[in-house]
Amino acid sequence: ASSGLQIGAGGNSGATIPDSVSLSMTAAFTLAARFTTTAGGTLIVKRKAANWNSPYCDYLMRLDGTNGYLQGAAGDAGQTGTGTTQLYDGTEHVGVVTWDGTTLKGYADGVEEFSTTPVAVTVGDSSQPVEIGFNLYAAEDLPSGAEVAAVKIFDTCLTAAEVAALSI
C-alpha cells in the first residue's frame, strides 16, 4: 500500500501547503477527501500549473458550481472528468480522483463516476502551493455550509479496490 500525506482542514477556511518535492507528482497521483457541502463550486484540493490560467493545473478535485458533481483534472491541457451524482446535499461524502499517467478517474463514495483519457497532458513540477478548501470562484473561504474534513494526497494511482477500502 502507498503512504499518503494526510492533512485535515475543518471549518469554513482553507489551507495552503507550500511547495515541496513530495507534491510534484508527474507520473501518477491520487487525491482523496472527506467533505460535506450544500453549495456547488467547492474547491477540495488543487495545485496550479506553472503557467496558471484556469482551468489548467497539475491536479485538481472540486465540485462543479452548477450541479455539485465531482470533477477532477490533470495536467497543463486542463483535461477534466465530471461525475453524475450530485454531492452538495449536506451529507458527508468521500471523493477520490486518480491519474495513472494516462487515465483520469473519479470516485464518489467508492463508486466510479468518470473515466477519461486525457490527450497530450503534462503534469509537471509547477512549484506552486497546494490549496485545500477554498471557494472555487473566488480566493476566499469555502462557501457557507461547506467543510473539507480531511485530505490525503498520494504519489501513486490507487486501484479501484484500494479506493473502495480507503479510510479517510
Image (cartoon, rainbow, N blue to C red):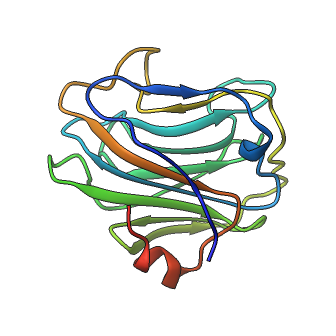
Q: Position of residue 63 (x, y in %)?
A: 38, 43
Q: Quadrant of residue 59?
A: top right
Q: Residue furthest top?
A: 139
**Rendered view: 85 above or below 64:** below
Q: Residue furthest left?
A: 90
Q: Please state if 57 lies on the left or on the right of 51 as rendered.
A: left
Q: Position of residue 71 (x, y in %)?
A: 48, 50
Q: Position of residue 141 (x, y in %)?
A: 35, 19
**Rendered view: 109 above or below 65:** below
Q: Residue furthest bottom?
A: 161
Q: Front-most of 112 and 30?
A: 30
**Rendered view: 141 above or below 100:** above
Specify the quadrant that holds the C terminus.
Answer: bottom left
The residue lying at 34 percent from left, 22 percent from top is 13
Q: How many marks?
A: 0
Q: Position of residue 136 (x, y in %)?
A: 44, 27
Q: Please state if 86 lies on the left or on the right of 134 as rendered.
A: left
The residue lying at 62 percent from left, 77 percent from top is 1
**Rendered view: 141 above or below 41:** above
The residue lying at 40 percent from left, 14 percent from top is 140
The residue lying at 66 percent from left, 26 percent from top is 18
Q: Please state if 104 lies on the left or on the right of 24 as rendered.
A: left
